[in-house]
């Protein structure tokens, strides 16, 4: 079950980054609440420390949600198309991507060995310094049935990302 929750978590964070084309570059705080987060086993302080020593940005997890810092590079902020969906790992693709002056929407189609199903992602902007999005997915992940919903909000914190690096693979145009 942990593998399924982690896979869905990675996918949910990727869909939040679809907002990047309308976001100010810099450091963002992203908060996500989801069903998968509520069911995810708690990490021990030792596990968290080991992950941080390996360079993993471990988010703060509580109350069925998580808060993390995300760096949006200038290239990501200027992009006019969605990033890849970590297709090699998830087997998922964005379809029917549409962007308006105040938001975006897309369908998510997964047909990989570990994930199969469809989803819908919708996001809304309040200027270039905040957004909210929702994600609904139905299918299977690692052989387990999935009916996943998550809600995400983001707010711009600063122009300088400090030690937080842009997520690999998301800065592609």
Image: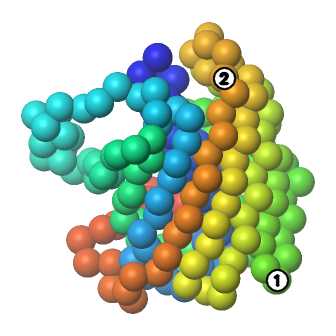
Query: Residue visible at 69% across and 54% down?
Result: 134
* Label 2, label 1: how far apart the Cα atoms are: 32 Å
Dot 1 crowding, Cα within 10 Å, few <14, some 14–19, many 20+: few
Query: Residue visible at 77% across and 39% down?
Result: 119
- The location of residue 77, given as percent across then percent down, is 58, 79
19 in relation to 94, above or below: below
Q: Tell me the quarter of the image containing the C terminus.
A: bottom right
Query: Residue visible at 51% across and 40% down?
Result: 9
Q: Which of the 4 image quadrants contains residue 152?
A: bottom right
- The location of residue 160, given as percent across then percent down, is 33, 85
Tell me if 161 is positioned left or right of 11 in this view. left
Query: Residue visible at 46% across and 17% down?
Result: 1
Q: Which mark is drawn over residue 146? A: 2
Tell me if 81 is positioned left or right of 63 in this view. right
Is residue 116 visible from the viewing direction of this image?
no
* Sequence-first disc among 2 and 1: 1
Dot 2 crowding, Cα within 10 Å, few <14, some 14–19, many 20+: some
Is residue 135 visible from the viewing direction of this image?
yes
- The location of residue 135, given as percent across then percent down, is 69, 48
Q: The residue tagged with tag 2: helix, strand or loop? A: strand
- The location of residue 104, given as percent across then percent down, is 79, 67
Q: Which mark is drawn over residue 101? A: 1
The scheme the figure's colours follow is rainbow
């Amino acid at each position: 079950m942990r593998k399924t929750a982690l896979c869905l978590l990675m996918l949910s964070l990727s869909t939040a980054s679809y907002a990047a084309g309308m976001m100010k570059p810099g450091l963002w705080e992203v908060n996500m609440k989801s069903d998968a987060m509520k069911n995810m086993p708690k990490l021990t302080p030792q596990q968290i420390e080991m992950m941080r020593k390996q360079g993993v940005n471990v988010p703060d997890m509580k109350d069925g949600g998580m808060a993390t810092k995300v760096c949006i590079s200038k290239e990501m902020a200027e992009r006019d198309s969605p990033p890849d969906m970590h297709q090699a790992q998830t087997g998922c693709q964005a379809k029917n991507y549409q962007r308006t002056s105040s938001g975006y929407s897309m369908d998510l189609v997964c047909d990989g060995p570990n994930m199969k199903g469809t989803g819908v992602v919708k996001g809304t902007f309040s200027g270039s310094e905040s957004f909210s999005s929702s994600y609904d997915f139905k299918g299977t992940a690692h052989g387990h049935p999935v009916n996943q919903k998550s809600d995400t909000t983001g707010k711009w914190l600063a122009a300088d990302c400090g030690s937080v690096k842009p997520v690999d693979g998301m800065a592609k145009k």
